[in-house]
Image (cartoon, helix red, strand yellow):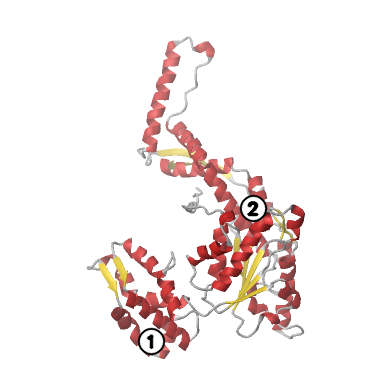
Amino acid sequence: MNQQKPLPAVPEKVINLDDLSPRQIVGELDKYVIGQQKAKRAVAIALRNRIRRQKLPPAMAEEVAPKNIILIGPTGVGKTEIARRLARLSRSPFLKVEASKFTEVGYVGRDVESMIRDLVEISVDMVREQMTREVREKASALAEERILDLLLPPLAKPRKSQQENPGDWGAYDNFQLTREKMREKLRAGEFDHRMVEIEVQQSKFPSFEIISSSGVEDVGINIKDMLGGMFGAQKKRRQVRVDEAREYLVGEEESRLIDTDRVAREALRRVEHAGIIFLDEIDKIAGREGGHGPDVSREGVQRDILPIVEGTTVNTKYGMVRTDHILFIAAGAFHVSSPSDLIPELQGRFPLRVEMDNLTEDDFIRILTEPENALTKQYRALMETEGISLEFTADAVRAIARYAAKVNESSLNIGARRLYTIVECVLDEILFEGAELPDKQVRIDAEYVEKTLQKIVADEDLSKYIL
């Protein structure tokens, strides 16, 4: 039986983007990303311009192209997080993809148009989830009636010619009364473990993988859809518990209530006017013109990406998608290359360049404590599930930040991601013992951090492997 996927939690507060100035957008990003004010400012302006464009006359709005951005900086400084949080704030379809996954036509790899198809799939899921929430109450009511029909087969209402017979009418009233009593018990969960028989769809599609070439992807052919009629789903009766039947029937009713054509139309509209693609590792395809060997392939990938960024129409199984107004945010470390190594045409499509700041020890302290999803808050919440009260003192946080900065300086700089490694090493014993700890009040101070990390950091060879 198909299990219905749980819906993501509905945000407590829905922000109206029309009411947010660029300064306020930066303020919202500050809740999750520390520092990097230049990058936040650039993406805030890009988002606000998107809102301004929607208020223009159609003829003028068509001419206003998004100002794509290149974020320049090492890993772990917040490039991806800024783009992802911007998409969540604006409730935009968002896709993160590595440019190095694409290769020039004729080489092994994915074709660049697949990123648009992936973005459309994400948008379809977003719209379907939203519409599912809208019909969930009605679907639950319909599923409840179907379960009651299984528990107590319906009794036909007396016809007008029969209503003169008091016995028929009385039997129907008694049936309705019994049904309402069963409804109360059903809602109270008293029937959850009772078995009922329902019809479920059982897919007969064979379990083998279809490897599609770039040519098949180009025309947006979905092989499974083509063979759907041949290997269509069949109905099968199964005995299941009432609580399982309710979950399945709610999902079935939701599918019936949702207009799939409307989902597709709205998903395509969101991609075209609100889609955001985060193109990571763009420095990996920055090869100079006229190069040899790998540089030839890199330049070919750039030329394949160019039409997508420039504005073209991509065929998907849901319909045609124009990419003219999708916002592209590219990112790369550019250690051995620079944005000027990209082909001139692609450079022109990314007019905004923002250099990210390296994270300092003070930044690490703020990252550990200030954001709503701060690392120390996450570990406290995790341990609370096992009855452990975990406390990080201020000097412990500073010690962790100091070690993270020190290791980044002495070895590869991976930015804030170093904090994950450091904190895991510090909490290793506590995380392992968990609920078995005799003392439910655990206090992490600077002395504890020093004791767990000093030997590892002192041994440079060991720290290269552990930290």
Q: The residue tagged with tag 2: helix, strand or loop? A: helix
Q: Nearer the viewer, residue 465 or 136?
A: 136
Quadrant of res 425: bottom left
Q: How far apart are the alpha carbons under marks 2 and 1?
A: 51 Å
The image position of residue 417, as x and y in percent, is 47, 76
The image position of residue 221, as x and y in percent, is 71, 57
Q: Is residue 309 left or right of residue 209?
A: right
| Local crowd size for mark 2, using a 10 Å CA cut-off: few (<14), some (14–19), many (≥20) | many
Query: Is the residue 434 above or below the residue 298 in the image?
Result: above
Quadrant of res 297: bottom right
Q: Residue placed at 58% from the left, 60% from the top? A: 21
| Local crowd size for mark 1, using a 10 Å CA cut-off: few (<14), some (14–19), many (≥20) | some
Mark linked to residue 267: 2
Residue highlighted by disc 1: 457
Labels 2 and 1 touching (C-beta < 8 A): no
Residue 395 visible at all:
yes
Q: Residue furthest top?
A: 164
Q: Residue furthest left?
A: 438
Query: Is the residue 158 above or below the residue 39 in the image?
Result: above
Q: Residue placed at 71% from the left, 54% from the top? A: 56
Q: Nearer the viewer, residue 164 or 287?
A: 287
